[in-house]
Amino acid sequence: MTATAVGPRSERGREWLMRVWPPPGIQRLSAIYLLGVIMLVFGLWISETFLTVVTMRIVATSYAVVGVLALGLLVPLVAGEFDISIGSTMAFSVLLVNLFVRDTGINAIACCVLAVVACGAIGWVNGLIIVRFKVPSFIATLAMSEVLSGVALYLSKNGEIVGVLSQTFLNFGQKNLLGIPVVMYYLVLIALAVWYVLEFTRVGRQLRATGSNPEAARLSGVRTTRIVWGAFVASGAVAGVGGVIYAAQIGTYSNSFGMPLLFPAFAAVFLGATQFRARPNVWGTIIAIYVLALGVQGLQLATQAGSYWLTPLFSGLALVGAVAFAYRRPKVRVAAPTEPDRSPEPLPVEAGRVA
């Protein structure tokens, strides 16, 4: 009698634990093993510069925004879509924060909120083009990236914006809290929010169902068009938050922002999709980001002079390797290369036939 009463609770507990921390395995934890190899190799090779608090803080600070960008990418990817415009959206957020502070005179917090809302609206337009006009997400968001770049060039007059953000505002991106860069706290908070939504809410289940089999999800009652549309709005809003954090970190705007962060973010998402769970997930993405970050940092410290070329080279190779590894493993469910059916609702006749 006691065993019967405890059984369901224990089963629910095991299910929750599986969501939080799936069983370990050499393939599912390969990024952690790779991280250990990186720490060992560079720790022995350049221990005086690599295994230092300063280096770890540099890595944590430099790649926190990449982490936020990757989390934004993760949402539409779970739904089976790509958002190529997210790097330009983040850069546009940095531009808007600087322009609003410089030209409007309103409170900096309000400027940040307006920038995030504007980026969410950009995601809404992406969703409109993809869902209503049935343009493939890769093409639609690539085009949006170019449009945003053009608008940014016009608004910034093809120049930099420097010195408009106060030191009080910059403290929110440059200070340390308990010895840890404050941007790491932002990354963890955003990761927790995205993780909770994807793993423990109805919306997360519908996102996964849409990305796995959109036709089956639609026939089971999931409004796949709304799910896809909402995924792009969320992606744009997260990119906007990333832009606000980046603005607080660097305090300036340049037309070179955004796109260089896109490739390491994509590499982290695809490498993270092979970790822990057989699909794109939050914590695999976060670990993958810092595996790539420490690899780049170690190579830069080892080569020292003239290592400016290492970051794009390493990011490009890591992206190709991560995608190849993700697709090579049949159990890893990443975004399908075909576009899902975006019919608004199932027709009654079709539903009757299926039944």
Image (spheres, rainbow, N blue to C red):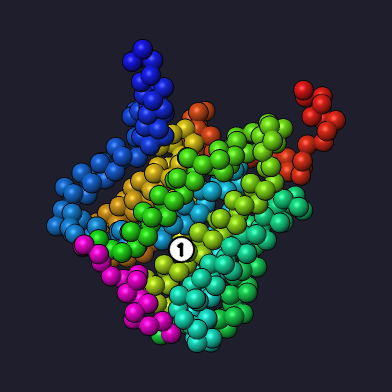
Image side of residue 120 versus residue 350, left or right: left
User: Does residue 193 appear in this view?
Assistant: yes
Q: Quadrant of residue 146?
A: bottom right
Q: Badge 1 local density, few (<14 within 10 Å), some, or many (20+)?
A: many
Residue 320 visible? no
**Residue at (76, 52) in percent of width and height:** 132
Q: Nearer the viewer, residue 12 or 21?
A: 12
Q: Residue at x 71, y 56 (%)?
A: 128
Residue 220 pos. (x, y %): 68, 32
Magenta segment, which residues? 164-179
Kind of element beneath mark 1: helix
Q: Residue at x 53, y 87 (%)?
A: 103
Q: From the image, which quarter does the N terminus lie in? A: top left
Q: Between residue 343 and residue 346, name the one nearer to us.
A: 346
In x, y percent, where is residue 135? Answer: 73, 51
Q: Is residue 182 above or below residue 193?
A: below
Residue that carries the numbered disc 1 in the rendered image? 242
- Disc 1 marks a residue whose amino acid type is Gly
Residue 176: horizontal and vertical position, in percent? Answer: 25, 66
The furthest residue to the right: 349
Relative to the observer, which residue lies in front, 261 or 321? Answer: 261
Residue lying at 62% horizontally and 80% vertically, measured from the top left: 154
